[in-house]
Image: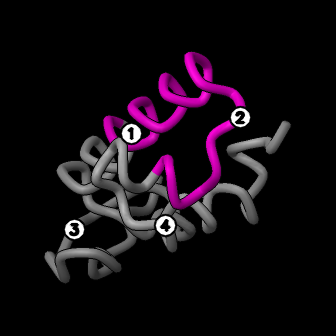
């Protein structure tokens, strides 16, 4: 299996991965997963929150939450 080199789109670190479409290094991917879990938990507990409310409660930028909505990872209720 060929390894592909790329720069992390978040921190810029050089990393190798078997898939060309991976854009985050392992450290940043794990951090994004933890951030996503915080947002998902707040949405579960408080389903009526706006994106700005979610950003304020979690400390995660609203543009990141919007990206997850656009990517289909978060579904608005």
Q: Is residue 3 above or below residue 10?
A: above
**Disc 2 or disc 4, which is closer to the eye?**
2
Q: Is residue 18 left or right of residue 50?
A: left
Instruction: Where is residue 62? Give x, y as percent.
Output: 48, 67
Label 3, on which residue?
15
The label shown at residue 33 is 1
* Disc on the earlier residue, 1 or 3: 3
Which mark sits nearer the N-terminus, 2 or 4?
Answer: 2
Q: Which residues are magenta?
A: 34-54
Q: Is residue 2 left or right of residue 43?
A: left
Distance from the alpha carbon under mark 2 to that under mark 3? 39 Å
Q: Indicate whether 32 appears above or below 2.
A: above
Q: Residue at x 38, y 39 (%)?
A: 33
Q: Which of pointers 2 and 3 indicates the residue nearer the eye?
A: 2
Residue indicated by mark 4: 62
The first of marks 1 and 2 along the sequence is 1
């Amino acid at each position: 299996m060929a390894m592909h080199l790329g720069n992390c789109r978040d921190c810029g670190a050089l990393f190798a991965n078997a898939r060309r479409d991976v854009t985050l290094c392992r450290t940043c991917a794990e951090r994004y997963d933890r951030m996503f879990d915080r947002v998902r938990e707040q949405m579960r507990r408080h389903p009526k929150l706006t994106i700005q409310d979610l950003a304020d409660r979690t400390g995660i930028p609203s543009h990141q939450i919007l990206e997850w909505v656009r990517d289909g990872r978060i579904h608005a209720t």
